[in-house]
Image (cartoon, grey):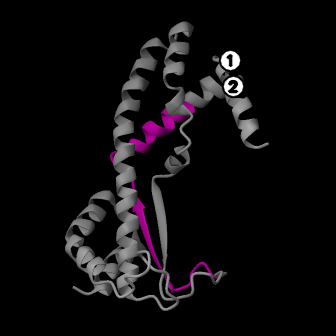
């Protein structure tokens, strides 16, 4: 199996539309053996993988793509677990929405989820990845369409799960930041943010 063929399989398919999670998982599974063999016999073995050589080989590019996609799929698995919990929380909220005291308890219980610092990861289900191919990584490229990048787009939305995330975060933001139904926690949050930026 050639590295270029495996990389092209992703980039060419991604040119037309975003790849699905299932497609990327299958690609990773299919190329697991090639990845292990490449890492074991890597020509730049003294460097951290993947290296950022000025003249980057397809083996290095393959490792970079494999590791990046694998890392983001792991992150997606964490998100899928979180979505299941959020579905339960949203159903509970809908059953207590007219009771302010129960809503306050619900919001307090969900503070950590709502203030999750990683929530920017959920901003869009379609993620685009660019991988430097064969150029000095310290050169600042002005042309976004530079052909020395391998680009891959993945749609991480599985059965509209991102709608659950949006619904939860919109509800949380309305209750916590706009209506401020937990004023003490809100003031503490503001104080912590202000200390962070001092």
Q: Is residue 145 above or below residue 95?
A: below
Residue lying furthest right in this view?
Answer: 198
Q: Which residues are magenta?
A: 143-171
Residue for badge 1:
184
Residue for badge 2:
188
Q: Few, some or many C-alpha atoms within 10 Å of disc 1 (few <14, some 14-19, many ≥20)?
A: few
Q: Quadrant of residue 160?
A: top left
Q: Is residue 151 magenta?
A: yes
Q: Is residue 160 above or below residue 109?
A: below
Residue 141 location, x and y as percent?
64, 82
Residue lying furthest front in this view?
Answer: 46
Identify which residue is drawn at 47% across, 84% down: 133
Q: Are the residues flagged by discs 1 and 2 in contact, CB closer than 8 Å?
A: yes
Q: Quadrant of residue 63?
A: bottom left
Q: Decide if residue 73 is in sight here.
A: yes
Q: Is residue 186 above or below residue 98?
A: below
Residue lying furthest bottom in this view?
Answer: 55
Q: Secondary structure at mark 2?
A: helix
Residue 167 location, x and y as percent?
49, 34
Quadrant housing the C terminus: top right
Identify which residue is drawn at 51% across, 86% down: 148
């Amino acid at each position: 199996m050639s590295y270029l063929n495996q990389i092209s399989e992703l980039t060419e398919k991604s040119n037309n539309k975003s790849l699905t999670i299932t497609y990327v998982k299958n690609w990773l599974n299919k190329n697991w053996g090639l990845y292990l063999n490449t890492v074991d016999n890597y020509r730049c073995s003294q460097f951290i993988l993947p290296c950022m050589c000025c003249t980057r080989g397809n083996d290095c590019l393959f490792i970079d793509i494999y590791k990046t996609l694998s890392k983001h799929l792991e992150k997606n698995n964490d998100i899928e677990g979180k979505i299941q919990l959020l579905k339960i929380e949203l159903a509970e909220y809908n059953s207590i929405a007219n009771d302010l005291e129960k809503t306050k308890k619900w919001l307090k219980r969900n503070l950590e989820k709502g203030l999750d610092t990683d929530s920017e990861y959920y901003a869009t289900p379609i993620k685009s990845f660019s991988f430097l191919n064969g150029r000095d990584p310290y050169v600042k490229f002005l042309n976004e369409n530079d052909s020395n990048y391998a680009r891959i787009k993945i749609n991480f939305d599985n059965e509209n799960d991102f709608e659950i995330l949006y619904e939860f975060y919109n509800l949380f933001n309305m209750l916590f930041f706009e209506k401020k139904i937990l004023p003490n926690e809100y003031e503490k949050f503001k104080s912590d943010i202000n200390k962070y930026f001092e």
